[in-house]
Image: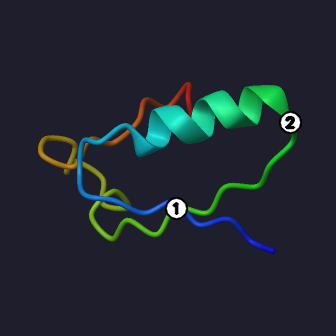
């Protein structure tokens, strides 16, 4: 089984996954089309580089 976390922008999906990753080893795949662009930080809720 592969868990999938989906939802609208700014509902704490990243925080949930970050907390989960602290408890057990997980592989996270982000499919947010806007977060892959450099310089497009405003309006995308892009996580910090330290979190990534």
Residue 7 in the figure: left or right of residue 10: right
Residue 12 vertical position relative to residue 3 in the rendered view, above or below = above
Dot 2 or dot 1, earlier in sequence: 2
Residue 30 vertical position relative to residue 42 in the rendered view, above or below = below
Q: Nearer the viewer, mark 2 or mark 1?
A: 2
Q: Which mark is residue 24?
A: 2
Label pair 2/1, CB-CB below 8 angstroms = no
Instruction: Indicate the position of residue 15 as horizontal and vertical percent values.
Output: 48, 32
Residue 2 in the figure: left or right of residue 18: right
Residue 31 vertical position relative to residue 49 in the rendered view, above or below = below
Question: Pointer 2: residues within 10 angstroms few (<14), some, or many (20+)?
Answer: few
Residue at screen point 12% across, 46% down: 43
Instruction: Indicate the position of residue 25 as horizontal and vertical percent values.
Output: 87, 41
Q: Residue furthest left?
A: 43
Q: Which mark is residue 4?
A: none
Residue 46 vertical position relative to residue 28 in the rendered view, above or below = above
Instruction: Indicate the position of residue 28 as horizontal and vertical percent values.
Output: 67, 55
For mark 1, give the secondary structure: loop
* Quadrant placement of the C terminus: top right
Residue at screen point 68% across, 65% down: 3
CA distance separating discs 2 and 1: 18 Å
* Quadrant placement of the N terminus: bottom right
Residue 17 in the figure: left or right of residue 27: left
Residue at screen point 73% across, 36% down: 21
Q: Which mark is residue 30?
A: 1
Residue 41 falls in image quadrant:
top left
Instruction: Indicate the position of residue 23 as horizontal and vertical percent values.
Output: 81, 28
Q: Residue furthest right?
A: 25
For mark 2, give the secondary structure: loop
Disc count in the image?
2
Residue 19 falls in image quadrant:
top right
């Amino acid at each position: 089984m592969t868990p999938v976390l989906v939802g609208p922008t700014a509902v704490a999906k990243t925080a949930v996954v970050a907390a989960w990753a602290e408890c057990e080893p997980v592989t996270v795949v982000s499919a947010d089309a806007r977060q892959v662009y450099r310089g497009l930080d405003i309006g995308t809720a892009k996580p910090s580089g330290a979190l990534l």
